[in-house]
Image (cartoon, rainbow, N blue to C red):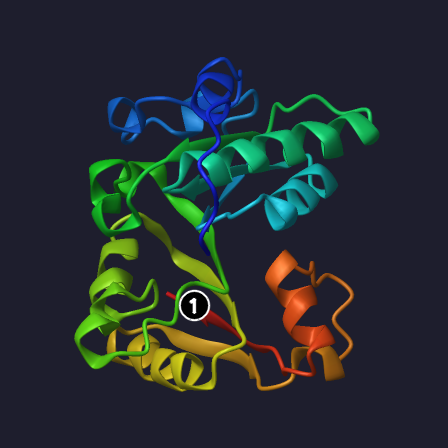
Amino acid sequence: MRIRFKAWARPELESSSFYVLEPETIKGKWREQFKKPNNQLHLELGCGKGGFISKISVQNPDINYIAIDLVDAMLGLAKRKIEETYKNNNRQTDNILITRFDIERILLIFDKTDAIDRIYINFCNPWPKGKHRKKRLTHTRQLEKYKEFLKPGGEIYFKTDDDDLFESSLTYFEETGFEIIKKTYDLHSEYCPKNIETEHEEMFSKQGIKIKALIAKL
């Protein structure tokens, strides 16, 4: 998603209590950054404007969350969305951290000590051209990286509107040793009380596009 430059975003992020400016410095120490370090630790890759992470984190105070995106402007909007959501629920932002980083280089900021329990990948760029497919967040190259810090038995939750990306991702997960424990080609036709819609999900659904989803277990 393209987004206009926002001059306020970086300084506002750097002044935030839940923004991590230099994530490389806490590689292997993410759990220690939270008030309750023994809680489960969930990670969203590509959090966008924060619609998903703000809702799920405020609803689950006994789970710690990390959200990553590459664009300052996007993270700035996510930061504001998180603050708004927590304020509306009379909650302190003590179970969430956000940071700016290139997910292709994710092993520079996480290792097995971080023991992530769950990864969320929501409506990532499908990179349809063959030469760009290695950039997909569900490509085998990326999945092998996630295995380095995902806890044994940990899960990846993946949602997309893109048919080709979904079909290819099923193969990627199987090739890298993940077990697909659930999949659907029409998420909204099922009863999913815990499903939290993202901004993209709502938009695509209104257009009549079916949402594909899976849960993969390591």
Residue ID at (41%, 46%): 116
Label count reads 1
Where does residue 34 sit, x and y in percent of width and height?
51, 23
The image quadrant where one finds the C terminus is bottom left
Local SS, label 1: strand
Quarter where residue 195 is shown: bottom right
* 2 or 215, nearer to the observer: 2
Which residue corresponds to the image point at 36% horizontal and 21% vertical from the top-left?
21
Relative placement, left or right, of 61 versus 17 is: right
Q: Residue furthest top?
A: 15
Query: Residue at left 73%, top 42%?
Result: 59
**Residue where numbered disc 1 is placed:** 217
In this rendering, the answer to whether 131 lies above or below 58 is below
Q: Seen in the image, is 111 located left or right of residue 87? A: left
The crowding category of the residue bearing disc 1, from other C-alpha atoms within 10 Å (few below 14, some 14 to 19, many at least 20), is some
Q: Residue 19's x, y, as percent?
A: 47, 24
Give, as a three-letter code, the residue at label 1.
Lys
Q: Is residue 35 left or right of residue 150?
A: right
Name which residue lies at 28% across and 70% down: 139
Q: Measured from the top left, where is residue 61 in percent x and y?
A: 69, 35
Of 154 and 9, which appears nearest the observer? 9
Give the answer, above or below, for where 115 lies relative to 142. Answer: above
Q: At which x and y percent is residue 76? A: 52, 31
